[in-house]
């Protein structure tokens, strides 16, 4: 199977799974580089679930999480807004036809040229968390519509953002609101980000309550136009996870603190939309067996497998203590033994899985990794000369038709599946896109 660099979406006319497609692609033996299978239907399903569980909260996708143009285009077709952190992200989002009103420039510390660019293309809404940023915005874009970013951290998060951004809601925010009023700047709302991959959902309640207080203070010091609450990101993105619990906390906190419908509520989910849609396939290309007598701290025979993607590529998150699960593409049932999985670079930290039990693998065997769309390709480097994996975008035929009609995706973005793929896993029903059942997503899309 030839790897295509073209941003094309393969249309499947029947049931399929990412695992089944990966198996089919690697079967030929000609594939050597790592690649992703990206299931656009998963993104559509997640949008649908979001709207169902949090109808009051408009998602503005955080582009930094994964700036894949076809992901951005799909979300644009669904009608989300976008959280951009830089000029390049604004360029990307507007290049697929998104209107500037659907963008928030949600980086509290912005480069002057990026502010000028935002101003030139009509992206008016932006966040800030310091006096310096206020003064800079006053000079460069005095008509900006400003959103104050406050700090409110979850008790536990894989990535805490509060260490870098968000002013203290009690000691700093009231002072900044007063300064903005003195400078004649227009404050339209409050934002926060509780941290990525959080486990404490109650934090959204605390942050929403703090935001309400700041709406009161803002109003008192002269900001009569406050009408935007931005509840940030932090939402779970794995296939097995659910936003039901967090949605309940958010919905009830909004009812308690912001019952008035004149306040528009937006959010900045990145991981939620990107993670589960991407399954990575990587090939074992070398191995080394370590026997106990040669290395005293290893109790049993252990195999080190070397794969063609690592922490300098897709697996950056492993260096932040996030674990990944390697699944053999074939031979699930074979007896398992102790092993570790390493990336391709010459660096000792390039360890993807430090300890696992897998069936014996040979050079040329493949492993797959689910839930790999968030902060993976967006961060990947070519360190040591290894390529960044390509992405194969795949979609159900009926969804393809609907997305095409809504734009910005056009007929030229879609290509029929190769014959070999069409029979893939015909017996396996993909839960997200069942061929037999009427698709709930079509209803969402107004079809
Ligand atoms: N918004 C901002 C300002 C961020 O910094 C981030 C992540 O760094 C996000 C949204 C996305 O967060 P998540 O991936 O947890 O949804």
Image (cartoon, grey):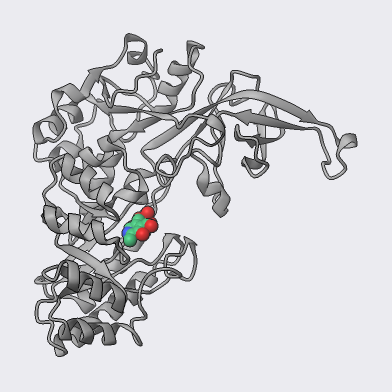
Q: Nearer the viewer, residue 293 or 122?
A: 122
Viewer can see residue 439? yes
Q: Nearer the viewer, residue 334 or 39?
A: 39
Indicate whether 287 appears above or below 81.
above
Whereabouts is ligand 1, in terms of quadrant?
Answer: bottom left
Residue 17 located left or right of residue 384: left
Residue closest to the far bottom: 220
Q: Nearer the viewer, residue 127 or 305?
A: 127
Residue drawn 28% across the image and 45% down it: 46
- Residue 9 x, y percent position in the rendering: 26, 25
Indicate whether 343 appears above or below 151.
above
Residue drawn 68% across the image and 42% down it: 348
Quadrant (top left, top right, bottom left, bottom right) of the C terminus: top left
> For residue 138, what is the image quadrant?
bottom left
Residue 277 located left or right of residue 77: right
Residue 330 located left or right of residue 240: right
- Residue 156 x, y percent position in the rendering: 49, 66
- Residue 124 x, y percent position in the rendering: 14, 62
């Amino acid at each position: 199977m030839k790897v295509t660099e073209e941003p094309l979406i393969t249309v499947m006319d029947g049931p399929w799974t990412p695992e089944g497609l990966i198996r089919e692609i690697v079967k030929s033996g000609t594939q050597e580089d790592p690649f992703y299978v990206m299931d656009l239907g998963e993104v559509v399903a997640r949008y649908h679930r979001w709207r169902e569980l949090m109808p009051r909260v408009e998602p503005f996708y955080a582009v930094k999480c994964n700036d894949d143009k076809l992901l951005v285009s799909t979300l644009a077709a669904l009608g989300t807004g976008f959280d951009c952190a830089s000029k390049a992200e604004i360029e990307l989002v507007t290049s697929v036809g998104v209107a500037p009103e659907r963008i928030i420039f949600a980086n509290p510390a912005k480069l002057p040229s990026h502010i000028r660019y935002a101003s030139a293309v009509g992206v008016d809404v932006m966040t800030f968390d310091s006096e310096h940023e206020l003064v800079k915005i006053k000079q460069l874009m005095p008509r900006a519509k400003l959103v104050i970013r406050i700090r409110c951290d979850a008790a536990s998060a894989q990535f805490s953002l509060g260490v870098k951004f968000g002013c203290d809601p009690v000691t700093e925010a009231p002072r900044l609101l007063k300064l903005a009023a003195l400078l004649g700047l227009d404050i339209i709302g409050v934002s926060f980000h509780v941290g990525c991959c959080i486990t404490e959902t109650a934090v959204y309640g605390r942050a929403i309550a703090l935001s309400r207080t700041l709406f009161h203070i803002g109003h008192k010091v002269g900001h009569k136009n406050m009408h935007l609450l931005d509840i940030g990101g932090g939402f779970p993105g794995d296939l097995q996870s659910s936003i039901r619990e967090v949605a309940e906390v958010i919905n009830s906190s909004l009812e308690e603190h912001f019952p008035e419908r004149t306040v528009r509520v937006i959010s900045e989910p990145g991981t939620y939309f990107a993670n589960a849609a991407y399954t990575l396939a990587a090939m074992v290309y070398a191995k080394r067996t370590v026997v106990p007598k040669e290395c005293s701290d290893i109790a049993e025979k252990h195999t080190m497998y070397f794969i063609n993607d690592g922490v300098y590529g897709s697996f950056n998150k492993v260096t932040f203590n996030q674990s990944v699960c390697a699944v053999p593409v074939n031979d699930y049932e074979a007896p398992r033994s102790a092993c570790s999985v390493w990336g391709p670079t010459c660096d000792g930290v390039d360890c993807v899985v430090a300890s696992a039990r897998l069936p014996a693998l040979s050079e040329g065997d493949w492993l797959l990794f689910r839930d790999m769309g968030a902060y993976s390709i967006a961060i990947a480097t070519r360190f040591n000369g290894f390529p960044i994996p390509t992405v194969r975008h795949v979609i159900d035929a009926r969804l393809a038709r609907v997305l095409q009609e809504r734009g910005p995706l056009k007929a030229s973005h879609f290509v029929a599946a190769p014959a070999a793929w069409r029979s893939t896993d015909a017996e396996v029903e993909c839960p997200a896109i069942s061929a037999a059942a009427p698709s709930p997503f079509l209803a969402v899309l107004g079809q």
